[in-house]
Amino acid sequence: MSLWSLNDVPPYPPARYTRDEPEVSAWLRRSAQPPDYDSFGLVQYHYLANQQNTNGDYGLYRVELAPKAGGPGPHFHRAMSEAFFVLSGAMKLYDGNDWIDGAQGDFLYVPPGGVHGFRNEADEPASILMLFAPGAPREHYFEGLAQLHELTDEERSAWFTANDNFFVD
């Protein structure tokens, strides 16, 4: 008697690679590579696999936060889910109800429309992985944060909307 049958296998998405032979298409990014963007020495962004690299499937970013670097308050996204995995340090994670203490190995998943936030309030640095699915041009968002002070309130509101960020009071 078999331990499993084909009826036991959950459905997979449709095949997207349909050629008979596999291809050599994997790529490696070394951990020692410098950050792709440094925001005033407070937050460093490593663009591990962005929208362009994954053909829009997802965006994966390693984010290094300096001690007491803060982070965004409660907000939500309409077009994408977001997930957080704490690599090191202590993070405050907002799950839509409360700010909870996140530690190394903790994971927070947020579906589209889910209120969330994160910040580093600790006296030590912290590092997280952030996953957006489907992929979105988050580099534009991360790098644009530094110019927000140059925008009018109306322009800033339009910029957040264009970048699928909706803050909650």
Image (cartoon, rainbow, N blue to C red):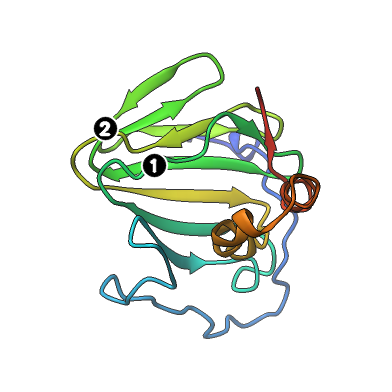
Q: Residue 41's quadrant in the figure?
A: bottom left
Q: On screen, 98 above or below 117? A: above
Check disc 1 and report the residue beneath it. Answer: 85
Locate residue 100, reporting x and y percent.
Answer: 38, 20
The percent position of residue 162, horizontal first and vertical second, equals 78, 53
- In three-dimensional space, the C-alpha distance between marks 2 and 1, rounded to whole angstroms, equals 9 Å
Which badge, 2 or 1, comes first in the chain's sequence?
A: 1
Q: Is residue 152 left or right of residue 61?
A: right
Q: Is residue 115 left or right of residue 93?
A: right
Residue 154, horizontal then vertical, whole percent: 80, 46
Viewer-proximal residue, 73 or 86? 73
Inspect this view and state whether residue 1 appears: no
Mark 2 crowdedness (10 Å alpha carbons): few <14, some 14-19, many ≥20: some
Q: Position of residue 59 (x, y in %)?
A: 57, 59
- Amino acid type shown at disc 1: Phe
In the image, what residue type sits under mark 2? Ala
Secondary structure at badge 1 equals: strand
Q: Are marks 2 and 1 in contact (CB under 8 Å)?
A: no
Residue at horizontal 59 percent and vertical 50 percent from the top: 132
Write the residue at 62% across / 55% down: 148
Quarter of the image with the C terminus in it = top right
Numbered circle sitting on residue 12 = none
Residue under label 2, please give it: 103
Q: Quadrant of residue 136?
A: bottom right
Q: Residue at x 50, y 58 (%)?
A: 60
Q: Is residue 148 left or right of residue 42?
A: right
Name the residue furthest left: 124
Residue at 29% over, 37% down: 105
Q: Is residue 114 visible?
A: yes
> In the displayed structure, would residue 66 be above or below residue 2?
below
- Name the side, left or right, on which 106 lies relative to 115: left
Q: Is residue 9 above or below residue 99?
A: below
